[in-house]
Amino acid sequence: MHAVVVTIGSAGDLFPFLWMGRALRERGHRVDFLGPVQHEPYVTRAGLPFHGLPADPAVLDHPDLWHPTRGFAVVWQATRPAMAELPAYMEALPPGEDRVLLAHPLALPEADLCRAACPGLKIAAAYLAPSNLPTVHDPLMLGPWRVPRWAPHVARRWLWRRLAASLVDPVALPDVNAARAARGLPPVHDLVKHITGVPDLSVTLFPGWFAPTQPDWPQPMIRTGFPLYDPAPDAALGPELQAFLASGPPPVAFTPGTGNRQAGRYFEAAAQATRRLGLRAIFLTPHREQLPAELPEHILWQEYVPLKALLPHVAALAHHGGIGTTAEALRAGTPQLVVPLAHDQFDNAARVVSLGAGASLHASRVTAERVAQALRRVVGREEVGGRCREIRTRFNAPSGIDQLCASLEALAVP
């Protein structure tokens, strides 16, 4: 089988696709990997042939990137130049191979163009987080807004349509339909409905205990566990960090995500909150300019630390709610304070709270006092710690990668 793997976005988007790509290669299949050009070191280190797609790092400074409603438009526009290269790449491949295109959801409009040009092409979509899949069933978050359980399904469907009609379709459909018109294809009127109808197989990269299968999710569907890919599995903690950890009680680690360059207010509030509570802290960000020039003694800055290595040594993890970070904390049994900003983060935060594994605070409400209040509900609370330890045992179950690979193999057979 020839598997073409295509993704967009940050390392958090990349690593799950590397998890799948490496598994397919280990089963003897040919794998080609398409992703943002800056991720080439990760992909080549994984031993996969890489085709770099254009990416503009300036998007990280866009003021709306982390906005709860306007963020989608920024991500969509930033990814279109890369996705526009996918049809030509696929059309240049030799015909006659058993081929599967394994795609990020935002690549599905272009994947559909590939199918039109390459009859018989099979498409599998990999959904990284539950909120990538629309549903009218509980728990239901529409961006930052929670839909109450008593709301009837007819009202929920109306809310979904209104949300898509105001925030998604006006942004995406002009690009999608222009590309379709150029190939003589009919226009699309509902992007979400179109995307979920493109794949021959849907894959959820999160377990059922985190998000049960909903009756209105696309079928056929394969469920896996969290794809906890580690690009440096043997990485150790540096001497400075080891010395800091040994010098006092377990600290709280804070990260707004590696791609967030707009977190100055977040770190300032975290510094004040931990000082008030007498807690130590580790600030994780590759963007040192977001932090005060001089940090107090109770705070250590680190550019990057593998969470797998760090989390067993901390009292809690405060983070943005990215699905990969959320999963790492659940695997480590680490209490969480989730501070969501945009995209799938609100839904992930709600699920962490529902599991009893931590607390949540909307990023727009961050102040030193509110961060301190939220940390009091997490740090040192035995009921939270006990729940986290129980959840940690769930990661002993099989990951589901073998079943996924077998399903893709069966899909590829004409």
Image (spheres, helix red, strand yellow):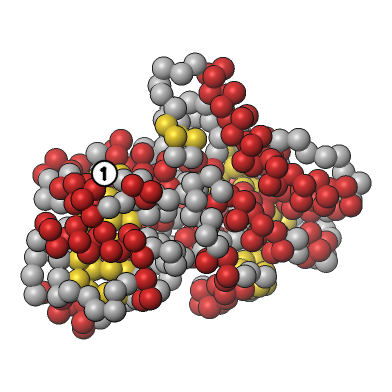
Is residue 71 depicted above or below 131 in this figure? below
* Secondary element at tag 1: strand
Image quarter hosting the N terminus: bottom right
- Image-quadrant location for residue 197: top right
Q: How far across and down, in percent of the image, does residue 284 sit? A: 32, 69
Q: Amino acid at mark 1?
A: Ala
Residue 155 at what x, y percent from top left? 54, 19
**Looking at the image, which residue is at 55% across and 38% down?**
133
Q: At 14% across and 75% down in the image, what residue appears?
A: 297
Badge 1 density bin: few <14, some 14–19, many ≥20, Cα 10 Å? many
Q: Residue at x 81, y 46 (%)?
A: 177
**Rendered position, 298 above or below 349:** below
Q: Is residue 338 left or right of residue 370?
A: right
Q: Which residue is mark 1?
A: 359
x and y, in percent, of residue 322 in the image: 42, 54
The image shows residue 250 at horizontal and vertical percentages of 13, 64
Q: Residue at x 83, y 66 (%)?
A: 92
Instruction: Judge whether residue 242 can be spotted in this image.
Output: yes
215 vs 260, nearest the viewer: 260
- Farthest residue to the bottom: give it: 239
- Of all residues, the one furthest to the right in this rendering is 184
Up-down: is 299 above or below 104?
A: below
Is residue 10 toward the left or the right of residue 124 in the image?
A: left
Nearest the camera: 367 or 305? 367
